[in-house]
Amino acid sequence: MITLHKYLLQKYLHSHSFSPSTLFPNCIIYYFSKLKTQTGKTIINKQSHMKHFSRALITAFIMAGLISKATAQQQTMKPEETEFYSPVPPVVTPGTTVGQAPSDAIILFDGKNLDEWVNVKDSMPASWILADSVMTVNKATGDIQTKKSFSSYQLHIEYRIPANITGNGQARGNSGIFLASLPWGAGGYELQVLDNYNNKTYTNGQVGSMYKQGAPLANACRPPGEWQSYDVIWTAPEFNSNGGLKSLARVTVLHNGVLVQNNTTLLGDTPYIGYPSYHKHGPAPIKLQAHGDKSEPISYRNIWVRPL
């Protein structure tokens, strides 16, 4: 519980403009006027009030001194003292169209081949279907993941739910982007891909969710048959040398240009059953899921990443 003198001092500092020279005397005037109002009694000769109030005023006096010192420094400073010229940010040439890879991106898929991908189950070259510059999920051969491993990064990826999609709930255009593929438990940290255009499911499992951890801020789905995009900023978790968690994973996601995850913190991986948990790991591949539902397989294109 805030004591009376602290309450009154805070009220004064929040409701008055002041300079260092007027802070101390005005605090006294304000305190005595308000204290009588608060208690309904005179405070003359109330030693307990004076004892506590004197402590509050010492704090105010110190604060006034700091303000005065800072003000004096600002009056004598030059603009150059707060201007920095190093380190110099690297020059990156942006794409000429929306979604086009910038000059420093690693191209993971540009429609030409699947050279950057392998099957998860056997580490053999990815056997998804490549046609018309897009790759389509092959549910018979399972998930694929990148050959390279990454820590924190910026990711762009586009996908298309087939126009003839069937099914409902989680069994309609289901896939997933595992932002770090792990060989245990839930298999990593999954950003859900699903057709939620007029298709209901549990909100922390719909498109744009960090599966069963973070429901999306909006449903930005386009109709089946249209290309859709994710832009992701992934901050990988960090671990101490003894395996303890040093910092949580965080993720920001835009779905079709709409913010759906805003620096969301994760409590661990994203299991279908049970609760999330962390286990020490380093850089990891990015995985695309071949979900086992019976709906028509979805397609991907234009995938690139910028390590951060």
Image (cartoon, rainbow, N blue to C red):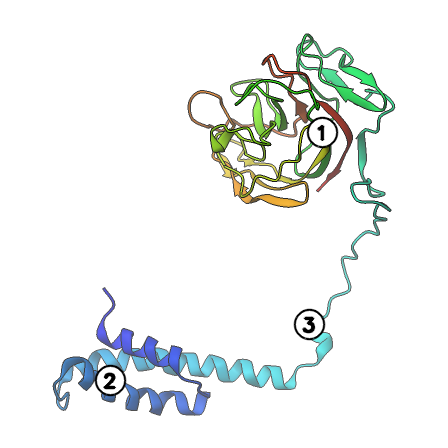
Name the front one of labels 3 and 1. Answer: 1
| Nearer to us: label 1 or label 2 | 1
Query: Looking at the picture, how far across and down is residue 228, in whole percent?
Result: 70, 34
Between residues 125 and 171, which one lies in front from this camera angle?
A: 171
Q: Is 92 situated left or right of 163 in this image?
A: right
Q: What whole-number distance in Å separates the C-alpha atoms at marks 1 and 2?
A: 64 Å
The residue under label 3 is which amino acid type? Thr
Residue at point 62%, 18% (across, down): 166
Depicted 227 relative to depicted 250: above or below: above
Q: Mark 1 sits on what residue?
A: 159
Q: Earlier in the sequence, mark 2 or mark 3?
A: 2
Between the residue at mark 3 and the residue at mark 1, the CA separation in whole angstroms equals 45 Å
Which dot marks residue 12? none
Q: Earlier in the sequence, mark 3 or mark 1?
A: 3
Is residue 243 in view from this perspective? Answer: no
Q: Position of residue 239 (x, y in %)?
A: 54, 34
Q: Position of residue 164 (x, y in %)?
A: 69, 20
Q: Which residue is mark 3?
A: 82
Q: Nearer the viewer, mark 2 or mark 3?
A: 2
Residue at image point 62% right, 29% down:
282
Q: Give the total number of marks visible in the rendering.
A: 3
Q: Is residue 20 above or below residue 3?
A: below
